Image (spheres, helix red, strand yellow):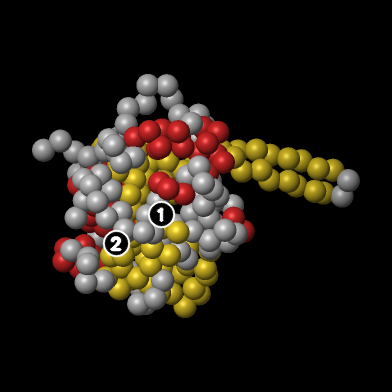
Amino acid sequence: MTPLNVALTGESGELTETFDIGPTRYVRHQPWAGLEPIAEACAAAGMSPIVVPYGPLAAGFDDPDVWFVSDLPRPAAALFGTLDRLRASVPRTSGLIMVGGYFSFCGFDGLGGWQDPSSASLLPVVMAPDSDAIQVPEGVRLEPTPDCPGDLAAILRAAPPFFGYNRVDPGEGSIVLARFAGTSPALVCSGEGRRRTVAFMSDLLPHWALSISSWDRFPDLMRALCMLAAEGL
């Protein structure tokens, strides 16, 4: 069986640090990238991850089986050509997973920007117009709904707690597969077709998911989410 090709994009940019020492100022710019734990989990699950470098999408980049988007603001996706590619390939040839964060969905103070009409229809959720990031210092666990397949439900129940998420409503025709503590949607997918759009509303890196990358079932979770996007329910 051919491994799923998963294109990982986001979680990268340029970090600017300013050092002020009296009247002397030094500004340092350096790149940052944080998708390695996701890539490692995908590889451990038998998939073929492709980390998309920060910047414009390379000419000739083939459509993957699944696009995985994490903390990539919509304006950056538009600038880099990623948004156009998503609109052209999802769900015709590719599934899509977006996971939560300050720069995902609407995001903190609207920094994600995916509620814009140019991108909102790609996702199976209805986003807030201004800000949707919710902090949960005490942590919250996933609770599968009756619509969640058994194998996926078992993984979600066993997942460690999450300490924040993006608050959304399910879109028309979408399926809520899990909630946070029985309330806000945690995992939502589009309702039809082989290729699906999937919204996982918390992070899968140590921002809101402090121990997820060291969890022994993290590769199982990544494979389950990617299979959901690539093959449907």
Viewer-proximal residue, 105 or 169? 169
State the residue position of label 1. Answer: 99
Label 2, secondary structure: give it.
strand
Residue drawn 22% across the image and 65% down it: 148
Residue drawn 37% across the image and 26% down it: 61
Label 1, secondary structure: give it.
strand
User: If the image is split into quadrants, where does the C terminus sit?
Assistant: bottom left
User: If the image is split into quadrants, where does the N terminus sit?
Assistant: top left
Residue at the top extreme, as displayed: 60
Where's residue 13, x and y in %? 55, 40
Q: Earlier in the sequence, mark 2 or mark 1?
A: 1
User: Type of residue at label 1?
Assistant: Val
Residue drawn 47% across the image and 78% down it: 138
Where's residue 126, x and y in %? 45, 59
Residue drawn 37% across the image and 21% down it: 60
Badge 1: how crowded within 10 Å, few (<14), some, or many (20+)? many
Viewer-proximal residue, 26 or 158? 158
State the residue position of label 2. Answer: 175
Separation (CA) of disc 2 from disc 1: 16 Å
Where's residue 209, x and y in %? 42, 63
State which quadrant residue 88 falls in.
Answer: top left
Q: How many numbered markers are drawn?
A: 2
In the image, taking residue 66 as reference, residue 112 lies left or right, namely right
In the image, taking residue 76 as reference, residue 7 lies left or right, namely left
